[in-house]
Amino acid sequence: MAAASSQTATKPESKEIKQNTWETLLKRATQRTVYEDSTLIVLGNTNCGKSSLLKSFRGIVRNPDHPYVAAYSYIHVKNRHEADSDETLAHMAIWQLDKPSRKGLIPTFLKSSGLERAMFMIVLDLSQPWSMEDSLKTWIEVAENACKELMKDLDDDSQKELKLKMSRYMQTFVDASMKNSTDVKEMGPMTGESKIDPSVPSRNLGVPLVIVGAKGDYFSNLLQKSKTAGDRFEFATRRLRQTALKYGASVIFTSVAGQGSNMELLQDYIFHRMYGFEMKQAAKAAATVDSFGLYIPTGFDSNELIDSVRSAKSPFSDSLPFTKVFINPNKESKRRTEEEKFRALKNDKFYRLLQSKLTTARSSSSGRASLEKPSAPRPKPRSSSSSRSHRKNGSRSTKDGAPKNNHAVRQFFQSLLTNTQKGGGSGSKTASGEPRKDSLAPPK
């Protein structure tokens, strides 16, 4: 009887457990956040590293046969920090543009109604640091103009709400390293919108913007060859952070080499901005040439922080363009080649040049001759070999070509006359066999 009573007692308990389980699942389903699909627009020059970055993303599906000119792919959005992290919560469409001339395609895959679930990512090629400034300026202009055109289709209240959302995030941001801080807890939540300044950031796109530096390993290797590697790295990061602060953007340096650097962080940050997933990685502003993994989230930076990393001995001021700090080796070699080229003159110009040089040389030589005064000839020291050669030739001359010893000359000509008299003039004959009348023979 006791066994039977125990069995009847366990049946209601099992039914109650099942009922509680179903109630829990139903409650979770009703309270669960519904995530909508989103759009990520990736902008960057050709071969800057966009495709390599996207290949490393979790859950990405590439579609190389898409009919559009812009490359297309999409991601299965999953929250890896949750227990059921394998569940797909939404889909994120990814569009890539590599030429500013194709900016007109943006409205075809991003509508005004989708701005609330859109994000722009600008990829810079760190292996070519001399091009970063112009590239960033070009692509920020493309993103800004695209947002302005799309917002024209929205009413004023919708436009203000999009921009206010960016201002609110930037001004209420708390870094992961400060979430457990007592200072943050004492501040408490911000009430209302009275403390939100709509003028911050000064250039508000109304959508999140992230500036990604790709090929950070190449950048590190390139700088290590320079004696001012630290100053150059500081200059590049400082200038990028200044631009990002103006637009309310974040800055992340990445690399796909080896196990990768900041690749998982980049995807987590995109999901964090688009879907509000928790961001557990703390900001990293103290990056170096060797440890280049810079991570500056939106809302973390300030002008004071940027100026604090400036070295007092740095030779590079903020007024310098990137092309002066980072020399393009291709343009430098081309410039040297151009300088080394020999350009031949035309015939008429060449002859006139020669004539002018000859005229100048003659006038200078005549001027020197007129300034010289005659002076007594001085004997010129000669070596023994030169003396023997002069004796053999029977002539000794000074610098002006005049005979040095007239007596020796007279003896020479006298010997010729003597030999002619002894030979009876037979020493020299004409072609007909007759004796030649020597012009040096004495008169009869």
Image: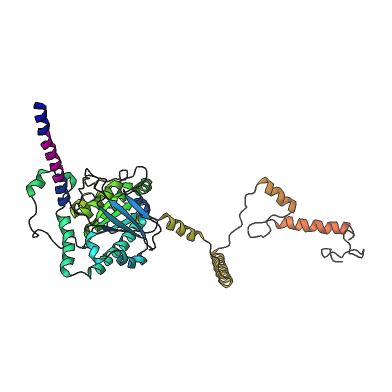
Image x and y of residue 284, in percent: 24, 46
Name the residue at 90% across, 63% down.
435
Q: In the image, 216: left or right of 332? A: left
Which residue is more in the foreground, 128 or 377? 128
> Where, by quadrant of the figure, is residue 50 drawn?
bottom left
Which residue is more in the foreground, 366 or 135? 135
Q: Is residue 257 visible?
A: yes
Q: Is residue 140 above or below residue 304?
A: below
Image x and y of residue 76, in percent: 29, 51
Image x and y of residue 205, in percent: 23, 63
Tell me which segment is drawn in magenta: 9-23
Image x and y of residue 416, in percent: 81, 58
Name the residue at 11% across, 47% down.
184
Q: How many marks?
A: 0
Q: Does residue 106 show up magenta in the picture?
A: no
Residue at the farthest right position: 433
* Quadrant occupied by the N terminus: top left
Q: Is residue 313 visible?
A: no
Q: In the image, 389: left or right of 39? A: right
Residue at the farthest front position: 1
Q: Is residue 56 above or below residue 106?
A: above
Magenta stretch prevailing secondary structure: helix
Which residue is more in the foreground, 324 or 437? 324
* Quadrant occupied by the C terminus: bottom right
Name the residue at 73% across, 55% down.
408
